[in-house]
Amino acid sequence: MTSPEERPHEPASGNGALTPRVAVPSRPCLRYLAVWCVITACGAALAALGAFLAARIMEGRTTGIGDIVAVVVSMLAGLPLGACAGVVVLRRVFRWPGGLVRGVVGAFLGAVFVMLAAEPLRLNADTDLLLVTYALCITVFATVGFVSRN
């Protein structure tokens, strides 16, 4: 019979909980920060990949404005999808305890919140502020959703 360390795909105890592959920080503030860093890195990576692919696909097909629109739209779609990918990485690959569905819903609620609040909060007056708010709301909402308890 092999030990639980030799069988990482099986539960280590009888309660069905998987042992984390990467140590989970014990302090709550460090846990939130670590989750936020992973979600932000995955979101930024997928947004940058989407922007690069959109620029390559649209290259030479339009007069210029189509390229810009494709890159911006792909970044706006890539950030929440990347944040969701970060939540999946945390839950499935790192095996950290947290709510997968709550993290995914939090990422999309963060995007919807910024889109709905852009006009009343005058976020659309400054594009830099709008994009930073968009990125922060998505990643913070996904982090709080993933780490929070029922």
Image (cartoon, rainbow, N blue to C red):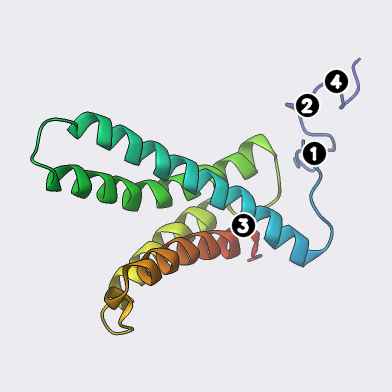
Which class describes the residues within 10 Å of circle 2: few (<14), some (14-19), or many (20+)? few
Verify CB contact (< 8 Å) between mark 3 and mark 1: no
Kindly identify which residue carries mark 4: 6
Q: Which residue is mark 2?
A: 8
Image point 77% across, 40% down: which residue? 20
Q: Residues within 10 Å of mark 3 (few under 14, many from 20)?
A: many
Identify which residue is drawn at 33% across, 41% down. 51
Which sits earlier in the primary sequence, circle 2 or circle 1? 2
Q: Nearer the viewer, mark 3 or mark 4?
A: 3
102 is higher (above) or lower (below) than 90: below
Tell me the CA gap for discs 2 and 1. Answer: 8 Å
Q: Which residue is mark 3?
A: 36
For badge 4, the amino acid type reads: Glu
Question: Which amino acid type is marked by label 2?
Answer: Pro
Under circle 3, the secondary element is: helix
User: Which kind of residue does numbered mark 3 sit on?
Assistant: Trp
Q: 65 or 109, which lies in front?
A: 65
Judging depth in this view, the residue of 51 and 13 nearest the camera is: 51
Q: Secondary structure at mark 2?
A: loop
> Marks 2 and 4: CB-CB under 8 Å?
yes
- Is residue 25 toward the left or the right of residue 33 in the image? right
